[in-house]
Image (cartoon, rainbow, N blue to C red):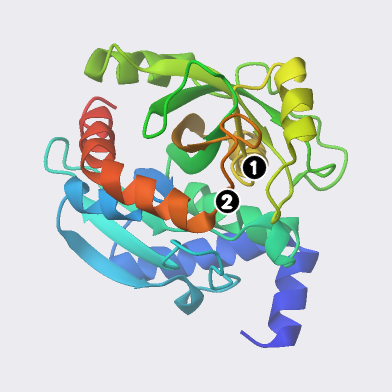
Amino acid sequence: MTTQAIAESNADPYQGAQDAAKALISRIGGTPDVALVLGSGWVPAADALGEPEHEFPVTELPGFTMAEAIGHAGRIRSVRLASTGKRALVFLGRTHFYEGHGVARVVHGVRTAVAAGCSTVVLTNGCGGVNPEYSVGQPVLISDHINMTATSPIVGANFVDLTDLYSSRLRALCKEVDPSLAEGVYVQLTGPHYETPAEIRMVRTLGADLVGMSTALEAIAVREAGAELLGISLVTNMAAGMTGQPLSAQEVIETGNASAARMGVLLRDVLGRL
């Protein structure tokens, strides 16, 4: 896209999502039913969902920016789920707030998905474990979040209720698949730097179990758009100061790759129950 086109889309992000949705429907030959955003370390799990009918770079649709973070492929995949026949739209990576393109770019993917017809959105991420009972490689259902980005994707005086943002119905379906799944509160900070040990003590005091640099802003946009939301975090490392070890992006990716098979089966079985 040209600089002018990006500026115009940012000026009216809702119309930008409608335009991208039309292009998406044309590209995949129909409307999708459910969207998944695969975060850091989750991309290999997409293969368990089935053979893609279509796959292409996100930048081939209007308004999208190529993902910059390690472990984010920047591609969209359309998969027909064998268990239900429904079409899943899989975002292999996301744009993060810290990349500097503005909040509208961060949530453009989920807005486009809902505008294209998705009634359910699954947001995943790789994150730091704040709750000392968690272990590296453990998936955790997001029950609530704390948005510490000091911003919102909502434009104008549109007051959206977030009381039951993360669907209790969908979390219950996940526990039918895997009764051992824990639930926790996720906090989004801006990044791209990792948190200090003092900041981790702060968010633990505030009630956080998980910490990361994504998801909360997208979740708000999903609720505003009217879709049902499921959030799943993969604990890719314990948060700063908890083990005495330094943090690295490579550790996040390696943990995700090691857990990819389990995460893929979890997503496949959960989607089969929607």
Instruction: Say if mark 2 contacts mark 1, CB within 8 Å.
Output: yes
Q: Amino acid at mark 2?
A: Arg
The residue at which mark 2 appears reads as 111
Image coordinates for residue 195, horizontal then vertical, percent: 72, 42
Q: How packed is label 1: few (under 14 Cα within 10 Å), some, or many (20 or more)?
A: many
Q: Residue at x 54, y 54 (%)?
A: 248
Q: Amino acid at mark 1?
A: Ala
Image coordinates for residue 132, horizontal then vertical, percent: 54, 18
Q: Residue at x 53, y 39 (%)?
A: 127
For label 1, the SS is helix
Picture quadrant where residue 151 is located: top right
Is residue 83 positioned above or below 143 on the image?
Answer: below
Relative to 274, is 188 on the left or the right? Answer: right
* Residue with the most extreme left position: 82
Foreground of the two, 194 or 184: 194
Foreground of the two, 40 or 273: 40
Relative to 68, is 57 on the left or the right? Answer: left
Image coordinates for residue 71, horizontal then vertical, percent: 43, 61
For label 2, the SS is helix
Picture quadrant where residue 175 is located: top left
**Which quadrant is home to the N terminus?**
bottom right
Which dot marks residue 154? none
Image coordinates for residue 254, horizontal then vertical, percent: 36, 52
Relative to 230, is 160 on the left or the right? Answer: right
Which dot marks residue 221? 1
Q: Residue at x 76, y 62 (%)?
A: 102
